[in-house]
Image (cartoon, grey):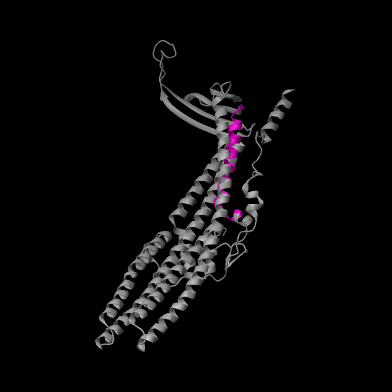
Amino acid sequence: MRRAPIIAIVLGIATSGCTLTPDYTRPVNALANSSLANGPLDSDVPHSSEEAISGSWWRIYNDPLLNNLVDESLRSNTDMRVALANLRGASGGLDVASDAQLPQVEVGASTNYARDSAEEVLRPGPLPNERVYAVLGAVSYEVDLFGRVKRSIESADATVEAAKASLAATHIAVAAETVAAYLSVCSAGREATVTQRAIAIQVEETQLTRKLFAGGRTGSLDVTRSFTQEQSLRASLPPLEAAKRTSLNRLAVLTGQPVGNLPPAVVACNDEPKLDRVIPVGDGQSLIKRRPDIALAEHQLHRATAQYGVAKADLYPSISFGASGGSVGLLGHFNDDDTYKFSIGPLISWHFPNRRRALGQLTEAQAQIDAAFARFDAQVLVALDEVQSALAVYGHDLDRMSDLQMARSSAAKASSDARTLYAFGRGNYLSVLDADRQLTSLEQLIAAQQTKISGDQVQMFLALGGGWQE
C-alpha cells in the first residue's frame, strides 16, 4: 500500500520541471541596462532628429528603382540564403532537443532461416536448420529530475533566436550594401558628368586660345597651358568610369544577377536620390532594441547560461524508466505463449565517484557565460560608438560641404572677373587659367563631397540598425 504514495511523489517530481539553476534573465549589471546606454544620443547634427528610425529606411530616399533593387537583393542574395539555411538548421536542432522530453519508442521485426552452433550451446551433434523470427518493441522516458532536458531545449531555443538575430543582421547589411552600391553608381555618374562638363568648357577655352594665338593676341605659352589643363581633366575621367563599373558589378552580385541584367536606368544614373526627410536617430534604448548584433550577443549569453544548467545537471544521477517486450521464437510457433518476453524498470546512471569530468565541464560552462557576458557588453559599446562616430562624421562632412559651396561661389566670381579683364586686355591668360582651375577643382571637390555624404548616410543607417523589422 505504501508504493502508491512513493510512485506519486516520483511522478510529481518528474513532471514538475525541477531545475538546479534559475531561468535566464538579463544580468542587472549589464551595460544594456545602464542609464548611459539608454539615454539620448548626440543628435545635434543638422538634418537629423530624435525620432526613432522606421523599418525600411531606404524608402525615405523616395526612389522606386532603389526600392526594387533592395527587394531583389533580399530575395536573391547568397548571404541571405546562407542565413536562412542556418535558421532552418537551428530550428531542426530545437526539434531534436524537444524530442527528448517525450517517451522514446522503438519497434523492430525480423525473420531469417538459420542454424545455431551446437558447440556454442554445448550440445552434441549438429542442430537443425530453423526459421526464426523476432518482433520487439521498447519505450523509455528520461525523468528530467534535475533539468538537463529542459536546459538543453532552452539552449537550442536560444540558438534559434541567435540565428534569427543573425538573419536580421544579414538583412540590414545586404540592404545597406545595396543602397551604398546604387548610390556609388549614381555618384560616379554625377562626378563624371561634372568632369565632362569641365572638359567641354576647357576644350572651348583651348580653341579660343588658339584663335587668339593665330590673331597675334596671345602667346604660344597660353595655348600650351590651356591644352595641359584640358588633358589633366581628361585624365581624371577614367578612374570615375572604373569606379562606376566596380559599383555596378557589386550591385549585380548583391542582387544575384549578371551585370548585363541590371535595369538601364541604374546604369545611366548620374545623380544620387536625396532623402525626403531628416535622418531619424532615436535614443539609446531604441538602438539597443533595434540592433540585431546586440540581440545576437544576448541570445548567445542565454545559450551559455542554459548550457551551464546542462553541465550542472550532469553532476547528478540520470533516471530513466523503460519497458520492452515482444515475441521471439520459431516461425512455426508464432504467437505461442512461450515466445513472449518483457522487461520493465528504472535505470539510474551517475558519474560517481569520479566526477572530475563533470566538474571540469561546469567550470568550462561558467567561463563561457563570463565570455558571453563580456561580448554582450562590448557589443552595446560598439553600437553606441558606431552611431556617435557616424553622427560626428556626417555633421563634419555637412559643414565641409557648406564651406566648399561658399568657396565655389567665390571662385565662380573670380573666374568671371578674370575673363572680363582678359577680354579687355587688362589681364593675362594665366590669371584666367588659374581662376578656371580653382573653379573646376572646387566643383570636383563638391561632387566628391556629395559622394562622401551619401556614404555617410548609409553608414548612419547601418549603425542605427533598422530595416529588418518588416
The percent coordinates of residue 65 (x first, y second) are: 46, 69
Provide the major secondary structure of the magenta segment: helix
Q: Place residue 94 in its image quadrant.
A: top right
Asked if residue 213 lies left or right of residue 61, the reply is left
Q: Residue at x 51, y 48 (%)?
A: 87
- Is residue 397 rendered magenta in the image? no
The percent coordinates of residue 348 (x first, y second) are: 60, 25
Is residue 361 depicted above or below 74 in this figure? Answer: above
* Residue 63 in view in this figure: no
Asked if residue 284 lies left or right of residue 238, the reply is right
Is residue 224 depicted above or below 61 in this figure? Answer: below
Q: Place residue 77 in its image quadrant.
A: bottom left
- Is residue 304 rendered magenta in the image? yes
Q: Residue at x 55, y 54 (%)?
A: 385
Q: Nearer the viewer, residue 335 or 364?
A: 364
* Residue 242 in view in this figure: yes
The percent coordinates of residue 7 (x first, y second) are: 70, 27
Is residue 35 depicted above or below 303 in this figure? Answer: below
Asked if residue 87 lies left or right of residue 216, the reply is right
Asked if residue 18 lies left or right of residue 421, the reply is right
State which region is magenta: 288-317
Q: Place residue 213 in its image quadrant.
A: bottom left
Q: Nearer the viewer, residue 303 or 5?
A: 303
Q: Quadrant of the N terminus?
A: top right
Q: Quadrant of the C terminus?
A: bottom right
Q: Residue at x 41, y 25 (%)?
A: 113
Is residue 160 depicted above or below 357 in this figure? Answer: below
Q: Nearer the viewer, residue 242 or 417?
A: 417
The percent coordinates of residue 371 (x first, y second) are: 55, 40
